[in-house]
């Protein structure tokens, strides 16, 4: 057997799951050794910087990002490439200046649950990553959540909208 015998979709799913699990396990280990406050600071920095890279990837892929819908779609494609196909979402409402997405599948939440790692800080780190990702894709737009699965909601609700 050769790596080429394994379908690309299967390799991608394995790689993203392993990456998500490793990230969660690493931050949990840092929390155990360095304490919750230090781990929280490190994770915020890492996730924030990771989000800033989304714009470069979107540009490399030639993804359009001229309005809220295109910016959100580019963010979703980049997120799925990096986090895997476990991300599931659908549009609730949209126009050129804003879009509301409902997210019902989250790779990071799944990794935390699978490893039995507490969700401490996940909502804030997720916001740090996603807010920076959207703003790096199109600096005219911002992103925020009004509902979060990691805070007990049945789904995440994300707004991407023109900055005021």
Image (cartoon, grey):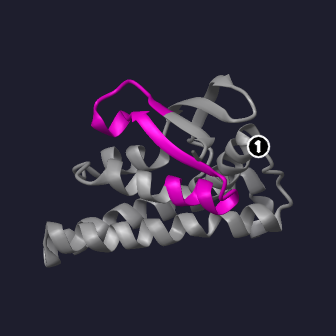
**Front residue (pair 110, 3):** 110
How many marks overall?
1
Q: Quadrant of residue 3?
A: bottom right
In the picture, measured across the screen, residue 153 lies left or right of residue 160, that is: left
Q: Where residue 90 sits in the image (x, y, percent)?
A: 63, 27
Quarter of the figure with the C terminus = top right
* Residue 136 counted in the magenta span: yes
The answer to if 160 sits in the magenta stretch is: no
- Kindly identify the residue that appears in the image at 69 percent across and 64 percent down: 55
Q: Quadrant of the N terminus?
A: bottom right
Which segment did they paint magenta?
Answer: 130-157
> Does residue 19 appear in this view?
yes
Can you name the residue that lies furthest to the bottom here?
A: 34
Query: In this figure, which residue is indicated by the disc labeled 1?
Result: 67
- Please tell me whether mark 1 sits on a helix, a strand or a loop: loop
Pinpoint residue 154: horizontal percent, then vertical percent. Answer: 38, 24
């Amino acid at each position: 057997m050769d790596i080429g015998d394994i379908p690309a979709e299967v390799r991608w799913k394995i790689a993203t799951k392993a990456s998500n699990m490793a990230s969660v396990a690493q931050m949990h280990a840092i929390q155990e050794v360095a304490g919750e406050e230090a781990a929280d600071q490190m994770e915020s920095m890492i996730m924030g910087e990771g989000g800033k890279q989304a714009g470069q990837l979107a540009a490399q892929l030639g993804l359009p990002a001229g309005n809220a819908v295109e910016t959100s779609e580019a963010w979703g494609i980049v997120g799925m490439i990096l986090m895997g196909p476990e991300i599931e979402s659908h549009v609730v409402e949209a126009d050129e200046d804003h879009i509301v997405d409902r997210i019902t599948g989250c790779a990071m939440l799944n990794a935390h649950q699978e490893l039995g790692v507490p969700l401490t800080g996940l909502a804030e780190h997720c916001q740090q990553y996603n807010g920076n990702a959207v703003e790096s894709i199109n600096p005219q737009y911002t992103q925020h959540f009004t509902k979060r699965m990691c805070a007990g909601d049945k789904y995440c609700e994300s707004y991407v909208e023109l900055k005021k």
